[in-house]
Amino acid sequence: MYDQIFGDRDPVAAPGTTTGTPGDWWTVFALVPDALKHSVQGFAFYRSPDRKLDPVLRELGQTRAGWARRSQFVFSQHCKSCRMVGMTEEMIAAIPSWSTAECFTAVQRAVLAYTDCLVLDGGRVPDGVFAALQAHLSDEEILELTYITAMYEMHAVMSTALRLEWDNREEPIVEIAAPEGFTSFDVGDAIALRRDENA
């Protein structure tokens, strides 16, 4: 697959992929060839015709996992994959705020809720969420969804940790500098002092 993406080009000397990413996910994973092979086998697993899970449901899980883990790379790439499996622009745009969107079916909402349980709640799934999933999906489909979504949470975490592709960005949560001339101000102390003065 590495050769399919880059051909005869050295992606370190001439970076970039057809989707516009820098391509350093591939070059970093290639540092440990069996890690790259294992990952590519994971891609083959979810694309296999043997999968029972609807590709739209699969992509909802993968894309929401990327968004929930704050991976710009996984989220952005799988928005493109969502289009390839026939999702509307309205649906793709609603993935970050799916719980208030009206464009998803009952099974799609169950998949998105389950994805949030996997990614945001560490796998703790309320009985009601699992029952909603079981109302629409077979045990095999639920296992495939769980495996693929958890795999993409891993990819989101690794991409963010190693600052690969679109996850090579500055930390967004930083201290904002105070205005020039500011020395110090303890809000809690000021409130307590005012309360004491008014007592």
Image (tube, rainbow, N blue to C red):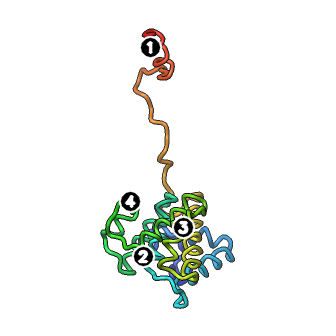
Q: What's the distance in space between the residues labelled 4 and 2, CA to CA?
A: 19 Å
Decide which of tag 3 and tag 4 comes sooner along the chain.
3
Locate residue 37: give its quadrant: bottom right
Position in image of residue 125 (x %, y %): 57, 64
Dot 4: what SS? helix
**C-beta proximity under 8 Å, tags 1 and 2:** no
| Image disc number at residue 24 | 3
| Left or right: where 53 falls relative to 37 | left
Is the residue marked by circle 1 packed among few (<14), some (14-19), or many (20+) residues within 10 Å? Answer: few
Pointers 3 and 4 in contact (C-beta within 8 Å): no
- Residue picked out by circle 2: 81
The structure residue drawn at horizontal position 54% and vertical position 81%, both measured from the top left corner, is 141
Distance between the alpha carbons at the discs numbered 1 and 4:
41 Å
CB atoms of marks 1 and 4 within 8 Å: no
Give residue 15's position: percent from left, percent from top: 49, 69
Q: Nearer the viewer, residue 199 or 80?
A: 199
Other residues around mark 3 within 10 Å, as few (<14) / some (14–19) / many (≥20): many
